[in-house]
Image (cartoon, rainbow, N blue to C red):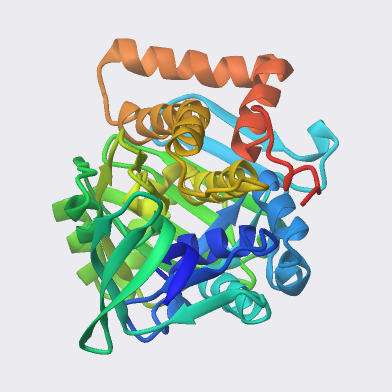
Amino acid sequence: MAYDVVIAGGGLAGQIQAAALGNSGWRIAVLERGDGQKALSDPRNLALSESSRRILEALGIWCSVQADSVPITHIDVSRRGAFGTTCLRAADEGLPALGYVIAASRLSRALRGHLEYLPKCDFFTQTKALGAEMRAKDMILKLLFNGTDNSMRTRLLVIADGARSQLRENLGLHASLVDYGQSAVATEVGMDRAANGWAYERFSESGPMALLPSASGKRALVWAQTHRQASRLWALSDAQFYTELQSGLGARAGQVRQVGERHLYRLQFYRTDQRVGERCVLMGDAAYSFHPVAAQGFNLVIRDAAWLAQRLSGMVDPGAASLLEQYAHDRAEDARRVAGFTDALALGFSLADPMTRGLQALGFAALESFPEIRTRLIRFGMGVDLPQPDLVLGRR
């Protein structure tokens, strides 16, 4: 079997990349090592930025999921036990929304359905890429297909098989562990009043909390704490968890009335500066992943996929070294900024010394007092403050 582009990984990152390449004219293969059901039952909620929404719209996917998304019109940001709060409002910027919340499983179903209609895209399940033999103009992928050794030829390999990608390591693209010293409890929470487009970011010395509106009518909660504290919260009875959550959240979002099934995630991630190698490029968690507090990681992946598709458009050889090196150079600044911003939010508020707390209070005051600072922060969160790929601009 021979393909122009092979994408190792059938999760959201791999699906987005395949969709972005859908009009390239190349033969594309997506390799999913499992049965393809994991992404379709992903319990997470995703906060999509405006740039992500525009890319999905240009790909023809947003129209099928828009009804199942919830707009974020306000973001209330506060710090527990300290002065300082701010509110980011879409109306202040003349926008209908600051972002959109959608169930990861719903987006995955839409993407999978979209890929089925692409004439030159094949989706393989129970297929794992193990390594590659490089040749002058392509590579031979070594596969495990339904438990049997097999192979596949390709000119470009997109590695999108997750943070602990063995394929990445086998091809010499090594990643470093980033350990925030935290775990996250994720669940859906019923409150005594409707969300009405409000999201909440709450910071404390022990870790940040995000509460988002969701299509279910409940709120999507991600609560990061130390490993021990998060494990304790996860194991509490519902009544005990109500009390702890209400204390951590305060009264800003209302009163907790119901809590769904809780999921516990260890916030350890891998990042690499080697985005590309010989005829291969890293995508999604295989390249880098981030603390969920700022909801920036998946939006960065969508922008990466759009830019890679644009760089490859019209090229004779999608795996040409000069092309991949230019792509890696172009995407470095966006990744550095997301990493810096996310790490500052995740870890900065854990510092309890008086000077740091004073600086935090000044930061909140500046956001409240100077609209231009709020605008810059909003544009960063929307993913529109850097040069945009054609898909954001509605061009394919």
Viewer-side residue, 9 vs 279: 279
Residue 366 placement: quadrant: top right
Is residue 373 in view from this perspective?
Answer: yes
Q: Residue furthest top?
A: 355
149 with respect to 313 (left or right)? left
Viewer-side residue, 182 vs 219: 182
Viewer-side residue, 365 vs 118: 118
* Residue 234 picture location, percent across and down: 25, 67
Q: Write the residue at 62% across / 64% down.
A: 19
369 with respect to 40 (left or right)? right
* Residue 235 picture location, percent across and down: 21, 71
Q: Residue furthest right?
A: 94
Please, is residue 127 above or below residue 16 in the view? Answer: below
Q: Write the residue at 47% across / 27% down.
A: 329
* Residue 189 picture location, percent across and down: 48, 68
* Residue 61 picture location, percent across and down: 71, 67
In the rendered image, the quadrant that contains the N terminus is bottom left
Q: Write the residue at 48% across / 68% down.
A: 3
129 with respect to 125 (left or right)? left
Is residue 190 in view from this perspective?
Answer: no
Q: Write the residue at 41% across / 48% down.
A: 292
Q: How many marks?
A: 0
115 with respect to 356 (left or right)? right
Residue 273 placement: quadrant: top left
